[in-house]
Image (cartoon, rainbow, N blue to C red):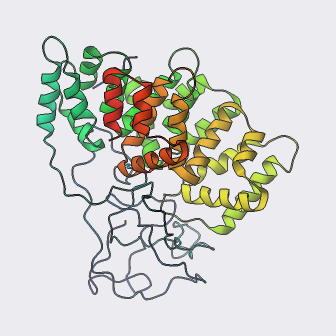
Amino acid sequence: MSYQQDRNFAPPPPHGQQPYYGQQGAPPPQGYPGQPPPQGYYPPPQNYGPPPQNYGPPPQNYGPPPQQGYAPPPQGYPPQGYPPPPPQGYPQYGAPPPHGHAPPQVGYHAPSPGHPQGYGPPPQGYHQPPPPQQQPHGYAPPHGPPPHQPPVHIDVTADVAAIQKACKGFGTDDAALIRVLASRDGPTIDAIRRGYHHSGGLIKTLEAETSGDFRTALVATALGPIESSVFMANRAVAGIGTDEAMLTEALMGRTNAEMASINQLYQVRYGRSLETAVRSDLSMKTEELFVMALKVQKPDEWVQPDMRAVANDVAVMFGATKARVGTDETSVSGIIIRSNEAHLRAVCKEYNRIHGDITKMIRSEFSGHMRDAFLYVIEGALDKAKRDADLLEAAMKGFGTKDDHLIMRVVRIHWNKRHLENVKLTYRNTYGKDLGKRIRGETSGHYRDMLLALIQ
């Protein structure tokens, strides 16, 4: 199918230069819930100390500010000519900041006309993230950049020239296309696509020069992390019927920044809103669920759960399913869609402790597309590597390979190399085989070579 291409928190100043919160003439604090952090904010690391036992009102005089631990925002993104995402930086699937970055000061309500100072006290029950847990050997957190490596300079102009040479003349140098496209990260891929001005652009060139599943894998990769999701969402609703798994994985579990970019780019590329496309293919409560996901504004991923809110959501979820005749789908949808991963993970664990396995409840109370969408989000909050390893196996098991699903999942997972390594380790531990060997046995030709290059 052709893809028509149209084409912070700022650190506090050194001590003495500016008053702090609670002192005369101090500006209001930054970073209250409900407002996006300024451009360049890095979410906090996940290695804080234990939470305080009693969180009281904010102190009137803070001590000296930290003298280090902040870094300037990344340069050169978003590229010119692209609609910018909301001010949270380039969406990299919840990546935490480099080691040593200080956490933002959070816990203040947004200004309200009824409060003389404009800011209320910290929300009740707020606490900092728990201390890190010891992980098994070989485990890496599912989010965040890979371990530090010396920076590698990528010459985008040379990549563009290599792709042009591979597609020039009689025949195509497929190995050269794989070598360039499968080994570049998201921002570099976007830069290559912007810089490729031959034959109507990179995507049109790849569509004209290649075919079949190999073409689909090349195009999905060349579109980059966000536009590939737009591409998959359109494939899911195009034509007769809906590819429910593809639509779910393209849209569910997204951050605010990712969803805003997906909505915006879909409108630009296909000339209609993504909501209109979704409504045309879905119906009833499932339609309501996906429209809710398209419009949702959830807490940022670094915001830790309030355990009283967690207990309330567990009670609502139980009351909407097991404690009544029939099922209140809307209440369950609201909890799952409007929660960030930390809150949803806490809800699932508390539900499991009180009422039993939440995934069994979802399977017994829901069916079809809605059930699968709920499980995708919940299982991702509990163990994203296990969920994605299972999805990869599901695309290959049985009679015949679900190539569109395999391509979508490999491309989606490969953007975060640390998560990719966790998926490969989990796949081996779960299924007793190497993921690369499994893919090699289910695919062939340059299509196989492309998938294998993406998971290296």
Q: Quadrant of residue 276?
A: top right
Q: How many marks?
A: 0
| Residue 114 screen position, x and y as percent | 59, 70
Quarter placement of the N terminus: top left
Q: In which quarter of the image is residue 70?
A: bottom left
385 on left or right of 327: left
Residue drawn 45% across the image and 54% down it: 142
380 w.r.t. 233: above or below: below
93 on left or right of 162: right
Residue drawn 25% across the image and 56% down it: 74
199 on left or right of 60: left
| Residue 344 screen position, x and y as percent | 61, 55
455 on left or right of 155: right
* Residue situated furthest front in the rendering: 432
Is any part of residue 10 visible from this angle?
Answer: yes
* Residue situated furthest right in the rendering: 325
Is any part of residue 231 visible from this angle?
Answer: no
Residue drawn 72% across the image and 34% down it: 367
**In-front residue for pair 375/315:** 375
| Residue 185 screen position, x and y as percent | 28, 43
58 w.r.t. 105: above or below: below
418 w.r.t. 305: above or below: above
Quarter placement of the C terminus: top left
* Residue situated furthest top in the rendering: 170
| Residue 88 screen position, x and y as percent | 38, 54
**In-front residue for pair 110/208:** 208
